[in-house]
Structures are given as structure tokens and as C-alpha cells.
Image: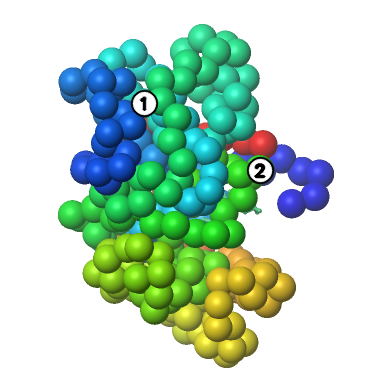
Amino acid sequence: EGLGVQEYTALKLRVKEWAPSAHSKIEGKIPEGGNVYFVPATLRPETMYGQTHCFVGPGITYGIYEMKKGKEYYFISDRAARNMAFQSIFPTWGEYPKVAELQGADVVGTLVHAPLSVQKNGVRILPMESVKASKGTGVVTSVPSDSPDDYATMMDLVKKAEYYKIQKEWAEVDILPIIETPSYGNLTAKFLVEKMKISSPKDAKQLAEAKDLAYKEGFYQGKMIYGDFAGKSVEEAKPLVRQQLLDSGEAFAYAE
Ligand code: A2H
């Protein structure tokens, strides 16, 4: 983190089917034909093929913001909406019209379409306790092959589906190998979580270490083994996948 600017890729995950609790809260607020998108901010666009879920903080307050009247709406944190209003992401500089307010817990179970993901029928919105309201958009797309946080959270959700009030089948999704590295094989996050004996998404210190190792090894030694840039290094593929997503309108640049 430090003092530098993070250049995120903000991905647009279109809602296909709302969870019942979200449905009642947005009723009458989104016009017929209007699309709502969950917008996770990621630093790893080259891994988007492997998205299995999208995480929200269950206790975080989110808004649905109007991007194109009657057409396009974003589900993001209030903080992110304000930042976006000053990055020319909303049509009018400094304005970020809010049409609804929800808690993360309200949207758990919602089904969204995740661009590039091999999960063509969509991915589920699930709860992640470690999502920070103070970072990115407060929405995190889950790539359990390459993110130790995502892997540990997914395993916990599968193990304790009842406690989390979710259907086990929502959490239990095949993990797609996307990147091969010399030290950790083709499922970096699983390898590190198991090797470091991380047993819970609450092992923050160990997860931070695993995240560091995964990020460095992936970026400097990783080779793509899936997608349009299979065979290329991660370093080369990262900006290429990002540009594809920007060009197709499925993502936009967001900085903070
Ligand atoms: B990354 P940095 Cl495959 N709270 O995307 C917690 N984590 C958040 C967040 C929030 N509010 N907003 C974004 N993030 C996550 C992919 C990924 C990410 C992979 C591997 C590592 C990784 C899929 N999840 O991040 O603190 C998002 O997860 C490790 C660096 O701004 C985002 O990128 O450096 C990353 O943290 C941004 O973290």
C-alpha cells in the first residue's frame, strides 16, 4: 500500500437474479430494463478467468448508484462512489446519485455474471468478514486459485455453510488453474494455505505473508496456462487482459 496510487481494474458483474432480501429493498427503485452491476476492484485482472464468487462484507453499508439513468447502476461502497465522482466515472463531475441502500448481508445469494469467468451460469455473492469498507469498492471478486484470502474464505464457507446461512452448493465451486509458477505449481493459493497450515480466514498475519509470497511469485515467475494469453508470462499478460476488459466495456479504471 504505502503512499503510491493503486491502479485498480473495476470489473462489472451484472446481476442475473437478486437474493430475496435484496429484492424487497430495491423494489421500485431500478426501472424495468435497468442493469445493476457489482463492481469489485482488483489488482489481478489476468486471473479473472478463475472467478468463482464475489464477496461483500456482511456488515458493510452499500449503495446502488445511478451511472446511466434507467440503464446502468453500480453496487459499491459510499466511499467508492464519492471517489468515482471525482474521477469522471459518473456522468456529472462530483455527483453520485444513490437510488438504494443495502447491507452486504442483504445481497448474499445474489447471482451475477462475471466477465471472463469460466462459470458461465454466473457466480454467487457470498460474505467475507475481512472485506474492508476503507479499500477499493468494498466488493471483492474471488479467485481461489491465486488469492490466499479468497481460498481460505471459500474453504470456511464450504465447511460452515449453515453458520453463514448459505447453501453449501453456492460455496463449493471447482477451482480453475490459471497460472503456473516454479515454486507453487498451478494452484498457488491452495499450495500456500496448506503449506503454511492456515486454517481460517481470520489468520490475518499468515494470510498477509501468503498473499505477499503469492503475489511476487505469480508476477515475476508466473506463466499463463489458461485464456487468450496462455504461454505468456503474467507480467506480459496482465496489461493485455486488462485492456481487453476495458475495450469490451466490462471494466473501467479506478484509482485510489
Ligand atoms: B485482488 P491492495 Cl487473484 N477488502 O483481486 C479486502 N480486500 C480487498 C478489498 C477490500 N475492500 N478490495 C480489494 N481487495 C483485494 C484478485 C486477487 C487479488 C488475486 C490475488 C491477490 C489479490 C482476486 N481477489 O490481492 O491492498 C482484491 O483482491 C492481493 C494484493 O489494494 C485486490 O486484488 O493492494 C486486492 O485486495 C487489493 O489490495
The span from disc 2 to disc 1 (Cα, nearest Å) is 21 Å
| Callout 2 touching callout 1 (CB < 8 Å) | no
Q: Earlier in the sequence, mark 2 or mark 1?
A: 1
Q: Residue at x 54, y 44 (%)?
A: 60
Q: Nearer the viewer, residue 121 or 128?
A: 128
Q: Amino acid at mark 1?
A: Tyr
Q: Is residue 88 above or below residue 19?
A: above
Q: How many numbered marks have been drawn onto this rendered protein structure?
A: 2
Give the image location of residue 180, x and y in percent: 45, 77
Q: Can residue 195 be seen at all in this image of the molecule?
A: yes
Distance from mark 1 CB to nearest ligand 1 atom below 8 Å = no
Which type of secondary structure does the marked residue at label 2 adopt?
loop
Q: Amino acid at mark 2?
A: Ser
Quarter of the render that holds ligand 1: bottom right
Q: Residue at x 48, y 80 (%)?
A: 190
Give the image location of residue 156, x and y in percent: 45, 74
Label 2 CA crowd tier, 10 Å (few <14, some 14–19, many 20+): few
Q: Residue at x 25, y 20 (%)?
A: 28
Q: Nearer the viewer, residue 25 or 153?
A: 25
Q: Can residue 179 be seen at all in this image of the molecule?
A: no
Q: Quadrant of residue 102?
A: top left
Label 1 CA crowd tier, 10 Å (few <14, some 14–19, many 20+): many
Can you identify the residue that label 1 sits on? 73
Q: Nearer the viewer, residue 43 or 104?
A: 104
Q: Is residue 37 above or below residue 180?
A: above
* The disc label shown at residue 134, or none: 2
Distance from mark 2 CB to nearest ligand 1 atom below 8 Å = yes
Give the image location of residue 216, x and y in percent: 64, 69
Give the image location of residue 222, x and y in percent: 52, 71
Which type of secondary structure does the marked residue at label 1 adopt?
strand
